[in-house]
């Protein structure tokens, strides 16, 4: 019988209609010889769900909240309640897909059942289908449990033979057994018991009337009271464009991505007639993977630390903006603890969704640092991967909103492309598609700066006149 960690218990406790504590990812699949249908998807998951046993467990509270909830087998587990089917109206446009994803990621998970859902979305153009994975933040920690997408990934279109055993749920302990087990654990781990007491006090405090300042960032274009609804937008760009900018101006691909996001927010604010001055900036929480003493990532989820970055939104020059971001992240690279992108992307069984889940957990765990936006960037494999025999063509992270943060951005590089997934509050950011376009425009600005420098005549020499 395993218990939720204090952090997982906090995520479960803070789940609400306006802040559903769930991470999601959207994968677009190309049609193969045998297009993926609902029955085959159910079959594939049934074959592999043994690899993630927590996907058939539910969290149960301990009487009197003496300890954190425990993970128990769901005696009534029904996979059809978790794997669902949806479809887009013809002609299956990107806008229709974005609208559907926005609705689905806003819908809370049923906390009385295992904390995940998977939607098979049909009707996309060109015969494609999409898989939308949803998992509670208390479920996927990158250590005990990985994202379901990870166990579905393959390097080829051929199915693997997965060992299968008939699953029988273990009987649920009674209240007395839960209490005795919890008290014994509290005696052995007094620090954890203290953390549980703090969680209980926090739950009581949230029921009291709010008086004074709550410590959240002030109201701004990125900070507001969250509604129950979400919007989603996506953007795909060429990885080579980011590499060209890096090679010309220095830094890393990650630096270029963050500078492009800063430029995109700047352009988006200008379209909304928001005030932008030279000093305008936003505090971004950027979770970053670090290595252990032996120089390797500590687990598949990796050890991740939150890095607070000031996005130079007020800087009008895109190259200067990039240099400011690179300088701000210089200390992280020079500590020697940063994980090279190729090491992360080449980890066996790598799934970007697990790393994004870990990054989102870190960002929420460090909410007290007052950041206004969460940005996760995870490098993925540069060779095609497959799910249920279908080639994955696109993959977009959906990072949850929390606190007063109205926008979050997840970025994944995969198979020579960079994919941006943008989640926004539906009421506060009705123009999330404009934000996506402005991010694309900011990348174009940097690419044009590279092309301009390469076509400019060397100093002291004149370019020959055209004939």
Image (cartoon, rainbow, N blue to C red):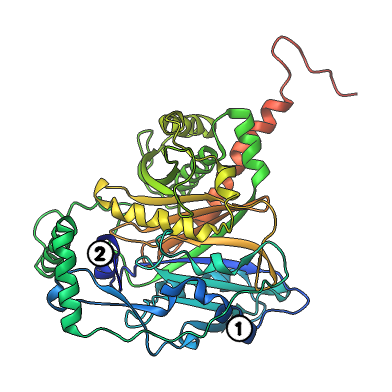
- 464 or 350, which is in the foreground? 350
Q: Secondary structure at mark 1?
A: helix
Q: Choose the circle earlier in sequence order: 2 or 1.
A: 2
- Indicate left or right for 308 with 446 as reference: left
- Indicate left or right for 386 with 147 as reference: right
- Indicate left or right for 455 with 41 as reference: right
- 215 or 444, which is in the foreground? 215
- Indicate left or right for 90 with 313 as reference: right
Bin the neighbour count of mark 2 within 10 Å (Cα to Cα): few under 14, some 14-19, many 20 and up.
Answer: many
Query: Whole-percent x and y of residue 39?
Result: 62, 87
Query: Whole-percent x and y of residue 4?
Result: 29, 67
Query: Whole-percent x and y of residue 146?
Result: 47, 64
Point out the frontmost of discs 2 and 1. Answer: 1
Q: Going 42% across and 62% down the picture, which residue do you hit?
A: 424
Q: Is 65 placed above or below 211 here?
A: below
Query: Whole-percent x and y of residue 251?
Result: 54, 31
Quarter placement of the N terminus: bottom left
Q: How many marks?
A: 2
Q: Is 429 placed above or below 100 here?
A: above
Q: Going 41% across and 56% down the picture, which residue do you hit?
A: 358
Bin the neighbour count of mark 1 within 10 Å (Cα to Cα): few under 14, some 14-19, many 20 and up.
Answer: few
* Mark 2, residue position: 10
Residues marked 2 and 1 touching at CB (< 8 Å): no
* Mark 1, residue position: 43
Can see residue 221?
no
Q: Is 189 placed above or below 16 here?
A: above
Name the image quarter holding residue 163.
bottom right
């Amino acid at each position: 019988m395993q218990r939720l960690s204090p952090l997982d218990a906090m995520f479960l406790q803070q789940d609400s209609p306006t802040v559903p504590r769930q991470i999601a990812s959207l994968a677009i699949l190309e049609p193969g010889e045998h297009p993926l249908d609902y029955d085959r998807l159910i079959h594939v998951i049934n074959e592999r769900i043994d690899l993630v046993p927590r996907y058939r467990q539910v969290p149960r509270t301990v009487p009197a909240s003496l300890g954190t909830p425990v993970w128990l087998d769901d005696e009534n587990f029904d996979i059809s309640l978790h794997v669902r089917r949806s479809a887009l109206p013809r002609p299956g446009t990107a806008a229709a897909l974005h609208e559907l994803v926005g609705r689905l990621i806003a819908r809370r998970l049923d906390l009385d059942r295992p904390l995940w859902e998977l939607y098979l979305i049909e009707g996309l153009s060109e015969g494609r289908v999409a898989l939308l994975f949803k998992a509670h933040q208390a479920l996927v920690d990158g250590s005990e449990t990985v994202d379901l997408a990870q166990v579905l990934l393959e390097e080829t279109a051929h199915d693997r033979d997965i060992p299968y055993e008939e699953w029988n749920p273990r009987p649920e302990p009674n209240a007395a057994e839960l209490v005795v087990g919890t008290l014994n654990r509290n005696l052995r781990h007094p620090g954890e018991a203290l953390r549980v007491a703090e969680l209980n006090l926090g739950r009581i405090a949230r029921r009291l009337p709010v008086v004074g300042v709550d410590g959240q960032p002030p109201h701004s274009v990125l900070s507001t009271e969250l509604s129950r609804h979400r919007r989603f937008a996506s953007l795909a760009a060429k990885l080579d464009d980011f590499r060209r900018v890096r090679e010309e101006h220095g830094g890393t691909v990650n630096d270029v991505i963050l500078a492009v996001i800063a430029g995109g927010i700047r352009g988006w604010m200008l379209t909304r007639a928001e005030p932008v001055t030279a000093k305008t900036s936003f505090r971004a929480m950027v979770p970053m993977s670090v290595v252990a003493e032996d120089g390797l990532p500590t687990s598949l989820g990796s050890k991740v630390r939150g890095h607070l970055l000031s996005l130079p939104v007020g800087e009008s020059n895109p190259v200067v903006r990039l240099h400011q971001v690179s300088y701000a992240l210089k200390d992280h690279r020079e500590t020697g603890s940063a994980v090279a992108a190729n090491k992360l992307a080449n980890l066996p069984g790598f799934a970007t969704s697990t790393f994004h889940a870990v990054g989102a957990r870190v960002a929420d765990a460090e909410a007290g640092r007052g950041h206004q936006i969460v940005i996760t960037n995870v490098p993925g494999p540069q060779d095609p991967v497959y799910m249920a025999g279908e080639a994955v063509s696109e993959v977009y992270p959906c990072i949850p909103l929390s606190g007063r943060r109205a926008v979050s951005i997840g970025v994944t590089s995969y198979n020579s492309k960079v994919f941006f997934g943008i989640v926004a509050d539906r009421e506060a950011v009705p123009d999330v598609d404009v934000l996506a376009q402005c991010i694309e425009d900011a990348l174009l600005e940097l690419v044009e700066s590279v092309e301009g420098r390469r076509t400019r005549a060397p100093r002291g020499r004149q370019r020959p006149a055209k004939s």
